[in-house]
Amino acid sequence: MADALLSVKDKKDTLPYSRPDTPDHGRRVGVYGLGSIGYHVARNLANSLSNLPLVVYNRTSAKSEKLASELGPNKISIAQSPADLCRLL
C-alpha cells in the first residue's frame, strides 16, 4: 500500500492538470463582529503566543476602539467595513 502511494507522489509532474502554487502573503486573522463572543475571541487571539496580525471589524466602531485601547498599540488593526476587513487579510 505504501509503495503505491509513493509511486503516485513520484508521478506528480505527469498529472494531466496542474494547479498553480498558492502565494504566501503572510498569515493574518480577521474577526468579524465584536459581540459577546467575538470581543473575547479577538482579545484572546491578540494576546496569544502566535503573534499573528489581527484585523477586527464591528458595525459600531466604539467596540473596536475599546478593544484597541485595552490591548495597547500595534496589537490589532481596525477595518472600516467588511470589504476592508477582507482586503486587509
Image (tube, rainbow, N blue to C red):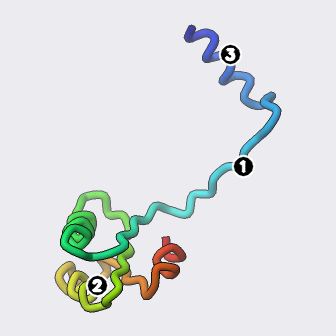
Q: Is residue 78 above or below residue 38?
A: below
Q: Say if mark 2 contacts mark 3, CB within 8 Å.
A: no
Q: What's the mark number on residue 7?
A: 3
Marks 1 and 3, the one that precedes in the sequence: 3
Q: Residue at x 52, y 79 (%)?
A: 83
Marks 1 and 2, the one that precedes in the sequence: 1
Q: What's the mark number on residue 64?
A: 2
Q: What's the mark number on residue 20?
A: 1
Does 67 sit left or right of 54 as displayed? left
Mark-to-mark CA distance, 1 and 3: 22 Å
Q: Helix or strand or loop: what does disc 2 sit on?
A: helix
Mark-to-mark CA distance, 2 and 3: 52 Å
The image shows a total of numbered marks equal to 3
Within-10-Å neighbours for mark 2: few <14, some 14–19, many 20+: many
Q: Return the x and y of residue 18 as percentages of the image width and height.
A: 76, 41
Identify residue type, mark 2: Ser
Identify residue type, mark 3: Ser
Identify residue type, mark 1: Pro
Of discs 2 and 3, which sits in the foreground?
A: 2
Within-10-Å neighbours for mark 1: few <14, some 14–19, many 20+: few
